[in-house]
Image (cartoon, rainbow, N blue to C red):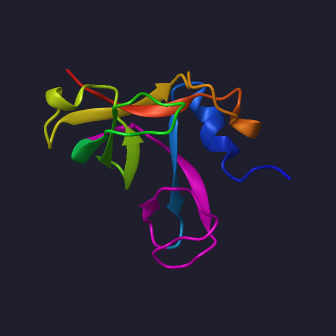
């Protein structure tokens, strides 16, 4: 069976971020789903986003699973052309402020962890814009 999210991961190889758009109600959403969470239509498709957005909220973890860095910074990013998504942030906690302009980009997944069929695909992270 073909994983439903494969187009998302494939596009990250080209540093392109895809989200879902509902062709019935024009809402965009993430994570991807074959059913629109707004109007419950199945008339959804992939659309490219700029990946640019605003850091809405962020936090850091002080204790993580063994495969991850001890301090992991994650945040909510409101995309300029779509939904809000949760992403790791490629910046130190102290350097961030709510409202920072960021971009979702492909990121190498350098953790020793079995990712199954995602093994050869990049992950993604939010990076502050200069």
Q: Name the residue nearer the viewer: 59 or 14.
A: 59
User: Which image quadrant: the C terminus?
Assistant: top left
Residue 39, percent from left and from top: 49, 79
Residue 52, percent from left and from top: 32, 37
Most distant residue in the right direction:
1
Q: Is residue 107 left or right of residue 74?
A: right
| Badge count | 0
Find out whether residue 26 is within the magenta segment: yes
Give the residues drawn in magenta, as a range: 25-53
Q: Is residue 49 left or right of residue 62?
A: right
Residue 116 in which image quadrant: top right
Determine whether 29 is above or below 86 in the image: below
Q: Is residue 41 left or right of residue 52?
A: right
Residue occupying image coordinates x 59% and y 28%: 122
Find out whether residue 56 is within the magenta segment: no
Q: Name the residue nearer the viewer: 82 or 23.
A: 82
Residue occupying image coordinates x 44% and y 66%: 26
Residue 117 in which image quadrant: top right
**How would you classify the magenta stretch by its main secondary structure?**
loop
Determine whether 54 is above or below 69 in the image: below
Residue 20, percent from left and from top: 53, 55
Residue occupying image coordinates x 48% and y 56%: 30
Q: Name the residue nearer the viewer: 16 or 56.
A: 56
Q: Is residue 113 left or right of residue 83?
A: right
């Amino acid at each position: 069976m073909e994983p439903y999210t494969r187009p998302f991961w494939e596009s990250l190889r080209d540093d392109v971020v895809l989200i879902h758009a509902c062709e019935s109600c024009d809402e965009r959403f993430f994570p991807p789903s074959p059913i629109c969470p707004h109007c419950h239509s199945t008339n959804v498709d992939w659309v490219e986003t700029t990946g640019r957005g605003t850091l809405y909220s962020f936090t850091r973890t002080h204790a993580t699973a063994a495969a991850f860095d001890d301090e992991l910074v994650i945040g909510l990013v409101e995309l300029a052309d779509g939904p809000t998504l949760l992403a790791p942030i490629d910046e130190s906690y102290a350097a961030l402020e709510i409202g920072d302009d960021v971009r979702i980009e492909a990121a190498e997944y350098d953790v020793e962890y079995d990712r199954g069929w995602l093994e050869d695909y990049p992950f993604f992270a939010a990076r502050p814009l200069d």
